Amino acid sequence: MKKLLILSSFLLCLISCSEKEKPLPRIAIAGIAIESSTFSPAVTEEGAFKARVGEEVFTYYPFMNADSSTRARAQWFPTLRGHAIPGGIVSKEAYESLLGKTLDMLKQNLPYDGLFLDIHGAMSVVGLDDPEGDMISRIREVVGSETIISTSMDLHGNVSERLAGHSDLITCYRMAPHEDAIESKKRALVNLLDRIESGKGKPKYKAWIPVPILLPGEKTSTRIEPGKGLYAKVDPESKKEGVIDAAIWIGYAWADEPRNHAVVMVTGDDEKQVKESAEYLAKSFWDVRNQFEFVAPVAYLDESVEMALKSEKKPFVISDMGDNPTAGGAGDVTWTLTELLKRPEFKSETGPELIYASIPGPDLVAKAKTAGIGNRVEGLVGAMVDNRFAPPVLLKGKVLAINEGDQDAQTEVVVQVGSLKIIVTEKRKPYHYVKDFTELGLDPAKTDVLVVKIGYLVPELYDLRGDWVMALTPGGVDQDLERLGYERIKRPMFPLDKDMPEPDLSVRWIPSSADFKD
């Protein structure tokens, strides 16, 4: 009996020691992310991506701090992770350079058990219809078919069959605005670790359903119905036995490519449940298609300004939607600013205060730095990239503030013209946070009117607002989709083809990445 106990203890020790000595999985990290409009004349170059390489990549992810439990679960090989403010189509040279650097770094530490691919999904590249599909295909050529790739995306991305085929695990955000972005990225990474550690590996089934709907994010916010209720159905489906993850992509409305449409995907090991979950979510989306409306009141600019001036709720926020840089607009359309400068209400410094954010104008910025705070300045701003709707504006006013060293704008100045306080930047910048204004000596909470180049309001501006309206203004991300003139998306497509027949929303099974052929 004593010998038996000793033998049992010895065997348990062997098992325990074996488990302790089991090497940690080898996992690479990569990603190139941007949302780019093909309806904007802007072209995005490599510098816009502000790429981080090697150990710097960890700084993107709070859950990957050096002492985090997630970090301790693997050997990590971060390569390149570049993220650009949304803009115009990416030049082929920029794309090839960024991807080339990524592939070179991946080759240095082969083989990998897994790869975390962190992308947006709405990148457009000159000469390519499906950049993310091209990217993952070329990554596959380097890492091989055995590596498990887990792809994390924005819900406004596009999932082609090629991207779905080369991905093993795939997920996207479930909130718009994207308050769950970090949570979603962590989910993608944890799913990858769980499948590797458990030995379950790649999912047995990947269900892909294209849904012929193409809507702007401003109509599909999860703050309101039907988006709120639709996305509330995702998590319960992802928790069903035999399912790894479930996701709904709205798609990206401002690119004219065949892959641009909504998609539902579910991954897992139970064929029946994966199929049922995918078809349930796809049908749920289609069933509420006629209920999507703008997340806030919508009006043309003149009406929007009248509403703001009459409102007793301050600040009254006007979203200048057509040139929203965080949706892919050039950010330098001067049409709205031109119209505001014409209005008599703002001609005097004693008029209602209106903060305008923002317009690029490096010429005026340079002159303002020379003139100094409190002095007058004159210079051209805007329409350097997108002059289709209005020409550059000659601003003449008093310099109220100068701020140098901003990560995006580089240098910002505030110029007062009448009662307008106009933020002029060296390079384009989105204004989403209260500190973006207060650092310039502006108080957005106490102004009468705040005009921001944005669509639906991000959380800080939403909480700040007294009231708000989304203005239908021209630009590369025009919210009136019928004015855009699509030529290459798949038709019929709702809502462009309102009387289209019922689509086939049955599952298309995507082969395992080991068997998928481009």
Image (spheres, grey):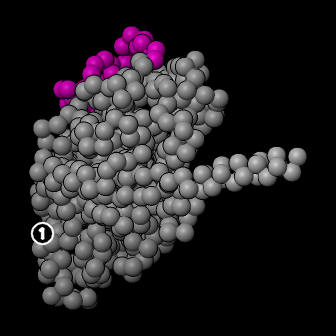
Main SS of residues in magenta:
loop
* Whole-percent x, y for residue 189 in the image: 49, 49
Q: Nearer the viewer, residue 203 or 179?
A: 203
* Whole-percent x, y for residue 378 in the image: 13, 77
Q: Which of 407 and 111 is in front in this view?
A: 111
Residue found at the far top of this picture: 501
Q: Quadrant of the C terminus?
A: top left
Q: Which residue is drawn at 12% across and 73% down?
A: 363
Q: Which residue is drawn at 18% across and 82% down?
A: 368
Up the image or down, 420 lies above or below 60; here it is below
Q: Does the magenta stretch include residue 488?
A: yes
Q: Is residue 186 left or right of residue 404?
A: right
Q: Which of 233 and 306 is in front in this view?
A: 233
Task: Classify residue 51 by image quadrant.
Answer: bottom left
Q: Does the magenta stretch include residue 453?
A: no
Q: Residue at x 53, y 61 (%)?
A: 72
Residue under label 1, please give it: 380
* Whole-percent x, y for residue 88 in the image: 20, 49
Q: Give the range drawn in magenta.
A: 479-507
* Whole-percent x, y for residue 446 in the image: 48, 72
Task: Classify residue 438 by image quadrant.
Answer: bottom left
Amino acid type, label 1: Leu
Numbered disc 1: secondary structure = strand
Whether residue 176 is visible, yes or no, is yes
Up the image or down, 125 lies above or below 209; here it is below
